[in-house]
């Protein structure tokens, strides 16, 4: 991360602390580029097991509180997720506040509790809860309950390197292996994350204003063995897929080899799930945190309120 950006983050921290993400915008994440920034990208056919990309069967088997369906459709895989975290969050609503959400477990997070993400970026451990709750309906108000809120993500089954990379955009840029969507390194209006980080829960998630929960940074529920004592995860785990179909891993390689990323945040080598080799993204502690641009051709995302 550039020093000037860090400085901007610090300056903006005070005024943007409680700003929540706007959902649904399709504006571009950054200036366009005509050449590929995915200099590490190589295309290799993926060997599919049970029709799905490696690692995806476990997500398909998740409870209907979290995943509606994961299925092959032609040359794509279609993920329909309720986008409800399978870990506790202070953003899970309680019956005394707004509509409760099946499978969503509320846990209090005090304002003085450590905030891993804020500490990582700014050396501040302050936690500042944002005003939205996770919603299953069109809004998180009592007046309009609904059970149809979901994301439908369509990804290529066989990801291929594109001749030019594609900028990510606001809203979902992929799905974590627990069905939660990833957002990019920007908040509404393409603002840097500065004002949002303090509001991330201990697993790195928070809801947008319309209630759609998402991760902008490493989802520690999937990558860390012990936070709160009862979690399992791995720093080198396959933790999800980008919209272009390429997999996303934790911050390290299981082989122990150093991670060497291109501008899209990807590299190419064999992984546990793809022994023949695959281009893949890694989450990391500096912007863009997850995916900087799509090396392949992104599929589609639809948020159905
Ligand atoms: Zn956000
Ligand atoms: Zn790697």
Image (cartoon, rainbow, N blue to C red):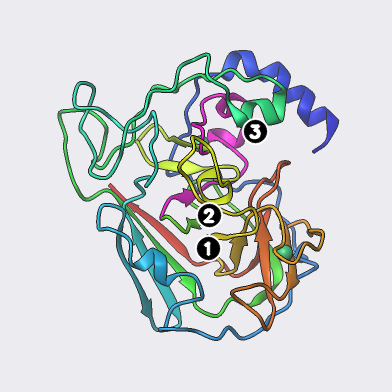
Position of residue 274 measured from the top left corner of the image (x, y, whole percent): 62, 77
Q: Which residue is mark 3?
A: 192
| Mark pair 3, 1: CA separation | 21 Å
Give the dominant element type of the magenta stretch: helix, strand or loop.
loop
Task: Tell me the crowding category of disc 2: few under 14, some 14 to 19, or many 20 or more residues within 10 angstroms, Cα based.
Answer: many
The region drawn magenta spans 179-203
Q: Are marks 1 and 2 in contact (CB under 8 Å)?
A: yes
Q: Classify mark 1: helix, strand or loop.
A: loop
Q: Measured along the vertical axis of the image, is residue 296 above or below residue 114?
A: below
Q: Which residue is mark 1?
A: 243
User: Which sits earlier in the primary sequence, circle 3 or circle 1?
Assistant: 3
Residue that lies at the very extreme toward the right in this rendered image: 3
Q: Is residue 32 magenta?
A: no
**Residue at 69%, 79% in the rendered image:** 277
Spatial separation of the CA atoms under disc 3 and disc 2:
16 Å
Label 3 with label 1: CB-CB less than 8 Å = no
């Amino acid at each position: 991360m550039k020093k000037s950006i860090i400085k901007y983050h610090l300056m903006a921290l005070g005024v943007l602390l409680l700003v929540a993400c706007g959902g649904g915008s399709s504006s571009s994440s950054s200036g366009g580029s005509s050449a590929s920034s995915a200099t590490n990208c190589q295309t290799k056919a993926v060997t599919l097991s049970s029709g799905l990309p490696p690692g995806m069967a476990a997500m398909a088997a998740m409870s209907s509180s979290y995943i509606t369906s994961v299925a092959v459709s032609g040359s794509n895989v279609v993920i329909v997720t309720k986008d409800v975290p399978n870990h506790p969050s202070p953003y899970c609503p309680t019956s005394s506040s707004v509509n409760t959400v099946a499978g969503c477990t509320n846990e209090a997070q005090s304002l003085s509790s450590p905030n891993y993400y804020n500490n990582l970026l700014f050396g501040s451990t302050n936690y500042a809860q944002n005003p939205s709750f996770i919603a299953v309906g069109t809004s998180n108000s009592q007046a309009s309950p609904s059970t149809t809120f979901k994301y439908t993500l369509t990804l290529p089954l066989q990801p291929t390197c594109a001749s030019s990379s594609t900028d990510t955009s606001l809203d979902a840029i992929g799905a974590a292996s627990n069905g939660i969507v990833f957002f990019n390194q920007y908040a509404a209006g393409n603002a840097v994350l500065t004002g949002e980080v303090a509001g991330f829960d201990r697993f790195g998630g928070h809801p947008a204003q319309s209630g759609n929960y998402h991760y902008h940074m490493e989802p520690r529920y999937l990558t860390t063995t012990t936070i709160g004592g009862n979690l399992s995860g791995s720093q080198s785990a396959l933790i999800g897929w980008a919209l272009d179909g390429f997999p996303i891993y934790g911050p390290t390689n299981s082989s122990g080899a150093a991670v060497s990323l291109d501008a899209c945040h990807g590299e190419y080598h064999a992984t546990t799930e793809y022994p023949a080799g695959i281009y893949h993204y890694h989450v990391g502690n500096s912007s863009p945190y997850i995916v900087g641009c799509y090396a392949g051709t992104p599929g589609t995302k639809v948020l159905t309120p």
